[in-house]
């Protein structure tokens, strides 16, 4: 089977990660991590890649980097090949070390840049390796918090995100500390799901800041997508979506003139449709999470789509739920999020 070619624009920012075969350890000692960091430095000096932030765990690594002149794939292949040779030679080992080709998600939206950056920094916390990102020595947050930036690291695209609890003094472009307070498990759910499905980050900031009226208009436009296109936007945690539906239950009941069982079916239809479109769950995941048969999930998705087209009240309630779930997901402290445009940084080859 022919693998799909990566469609990454030259010089675009990219979130990339990879791990060991069957989740086995890739980095067993401090020397292993230092060897990889030296490879990062060498690849940067040679113009193969530009790295803005990173986190290295025992089984995998994450980087936020720039696709310098379209050479990111070449650079990571070179890094992984030399690292695998080091790992095997130092242990008298043979065989594959890296599980598969690396994941890579292009980043164009400043809001999604913040999500990906904080997700990378929070990886050691999610893995139970540190209480705070700045306490973990094999991540860029550790060095940013101490003002110790390696000469090969290029943090400029994320300088406006390096703030409390990391280092507020280094954040002249705006305070993103409330974004860092988003539940790290929610960050992982959304960032990893978007990476697996390849959903574009286009208009991400607008989507998570949309009012209910804006959300309704976006839903209308979203429904016009041709059949077969992936309609998922993936901007809300599934748990927050379920909570938002529950919060609107009274309004749904007040507008419903039928039986209680019909009301339950309507709420089920709404929940299934929103978990699919805005939380990105597959039909199998929805079936397992809600305890429904896959046939019921399929019927609910068809009914949801039809009601969005035909029922203005249903559309308005749906938009209100999306707004509530989005705010609950991304604004745990404040109801307003603003994403300043990240500074434009010239490619590394133009700096040398």
Image: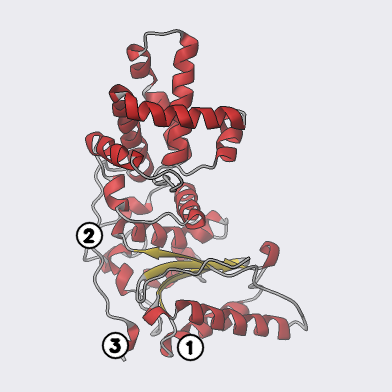
Q: Quadrant of residue 116?
A: bottom left
Residue identifier under label 2: 340
Measure the alpha-carbon separation of dots 2 and 1: 32 Å
Category of crowding for the residue at label 1, using alpha-carbon neighbours closer than 10 angstroms: few (below 14), some (14–19), many (at least 20): some
Q: Secondary structure at mark 2?
A: loop
Residue beneath the point at 48% across and 19% down = 265
Report helix, strand or loop for mark 1. Answer: helix
Mark nearer the N terminus (3 vs 1): 1
Tell me, for residue 102, which label it has, or none: none
User: Which type of secondary structure does the marked residue at label 3 adopt?
Assistant: helix
Q: Residues within 10 Å of mark 2 (few under 14, many from 20)?
A: some
The percent position of residue 291, horizontal first and vertical second, equals 61, 28
Foreground mark, 3 or 1? 3
Give the residue displayed 45% in from the left and 33% down from the top: 273
Per the image, the residue denoted by label 3 is: 350
Please identify the quadrant where the N terminus is shown: bottom right
């Amino acid at each position: 089977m022919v693998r799909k070619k990566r469609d990454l624009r030259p010089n675009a920012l990219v979130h990339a990660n990879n791990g060991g075969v069957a989740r086995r350890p890739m980095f067993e000692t401090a020397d292993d991590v230092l060897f990889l960091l030296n490879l990062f430095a060498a690849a940067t000096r040679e113009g193969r890649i530009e790295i803005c932030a990173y986190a290295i765990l025992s089984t995998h690594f994450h980087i936020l980097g720039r696709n310098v002149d379209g050479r990111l794939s070449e650079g990571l292949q070179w890094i992984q090949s030399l690292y695998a040779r080091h790992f095997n030679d130092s242990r008298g080992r043979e065989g594959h070390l890296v599980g598969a080709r690396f994941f890579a998600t292009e980043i164009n939206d400043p809001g999604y840049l913040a999500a990906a950056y904080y997700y990378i920094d929070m990886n050691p916390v999610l893995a139970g390796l540190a209480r705070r990102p700045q306490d973990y020595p094999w991540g860029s947050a550790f060095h940013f918090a101490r003002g110790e930036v390696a000469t090969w690291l290029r943090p400029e695209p994320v300088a406006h995100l390096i703030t409390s609890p990391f280092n507020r003094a280094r954040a002249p472009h705006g305070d993103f500390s409330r974004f860092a307070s988003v539940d790290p498990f929610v960050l992982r759910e959304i960032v990893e799901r978007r990476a697996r499905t390849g959903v574009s980050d286009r208009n991400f900031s607008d989507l998570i800041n949309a009012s209910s009226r804006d959300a309704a208009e976006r839903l209308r436009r979203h429904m016009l997508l041709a059949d077969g296109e992936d309609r998922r936007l993936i901007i809300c945690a599934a748990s927050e979506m379920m909570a938002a539906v529950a919060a609107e239950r009274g309004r749904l009941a007040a507008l419903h003139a039928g039986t209680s069982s019909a009301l339950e079916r309507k709420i089920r239809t709404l929940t299934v449709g929103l978990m699919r479109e805005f939380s990105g769950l597959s039909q199998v995941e929805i079936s397992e999470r809600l305890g429904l048969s896959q046939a019921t999930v399929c019927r609910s998705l068809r009914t949801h789509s039809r009601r969005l087209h035909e029922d203005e009240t249903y559309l308005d309630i749906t938009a209100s739920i999306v707004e509530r779930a989005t705010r609950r997901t991304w604004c745990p402290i404040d109801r307003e999020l603003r994403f300043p445009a990240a500074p434009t940084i010239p490619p590394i080859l133009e700096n040398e």
